[in-house]
Image (cartoon, rainbow, N blue to C red):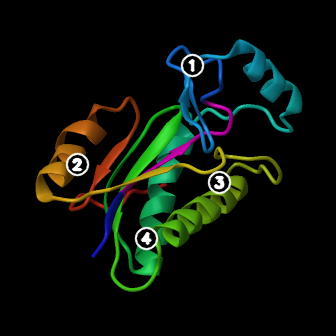
Amino acid sequence: MPVYLFTFHAYRSWMPDHPRGFVQRDRGVQPRNSRLADAYDQAAQYPPVVFDDSIQKALVWIAHDVCQRQGWRLHAMATDPTHVHLVVSWRGDPSWQKVARRIKNVGSLALGRRFSKSSGHWFSRGGSRKRVNDRAHFEHLVRSYLPSHRGRYWREGQDAPAL
């Protein structure tokens, strides 16, 4: 049974002028680049997204709901104004790509409906995923890393989140 840590960033939340650098597709981590950030700003079709508390609350509910409907197990998740982390496992055929895509697609649709935003983007393209290979890594994620985030934290065994 695969277990993954997925990370999805809010749209335009981590730009090339970020002080810690940025990740560029197929090139990995790159140093800060203000000129490229300006070019991205000029080309952007939608404003940046910040996951405020109401959006974070909705993200927890949506992730819990989509995983439950798909028969996947959401072990824990944490939110932040700029991103969301989910620890998810599943049995059967779906690839990690299909699972990640489904969570983001349903998340975007549900957020758009909830916050009356019919066009635009909620998440940056792509996202990251790390396979959780052992129990120690899993325990570190759900007991230390995820709870250290600034937003909401939900862990399996707690009541289902409510909107």
Give the numbered dot on residue 101.
Answer: none
Residue type for callout 4: Cys
Q: Which residue is mark 4?
A: 67
Q: Is residue 111 above or below residue 25?
A: below
Residue type for callout 1: Pro
Outermost left residue: 136
Q: Which residue is mark 2?
A: 142
Question: In the image, which residues are magenta?
Answer: 5-13
Secondary structure type for disc 1 = loop
Q: Position of residue 66 (x, y in %)?
A: 49, 70
Q: Position of residue 22 (x, y in %)?
A: 57, 27
Give the numbered dot on residue 31.
Answer: 1
Horizontal arrangement in the rendering, residue 151 relative to residue 136 (left or right): right
Q: Which residue is mark 3?
A: 111
**Viewer-nearest of labels 2 and 3?**
2
Comparing 26 with 113, the one in front is: 26
Queried whether the magenta region covers residue 12, the answer comes back as yes
Q: Earlier in the sequence, mark 4 or mark 2?
A: 4
Queried whether the magenta region covers residue 61, the answer comes back as no
Secondary structure type for disc 4 = helix
**Viewer-nearest of labels 3 and 1?**
1
In 3D space, how far apart are the residues under numbered discs 1 and 2 (Cα atoms)? Answer: 30 Å
Residue type for callout 2: Val
Which residue is at 35% across, 63% downward?
A: 88
In 3D space, how far apart are the residues under numbered discs 3 and 1 (Cα atoms)? Answer: 32 Å
Q: Is residue 96 above or below residue 122?
A: below
Total labels drawn: 4
Q: Earlier in the sequence, mark 3 or mark 4?
A: 4
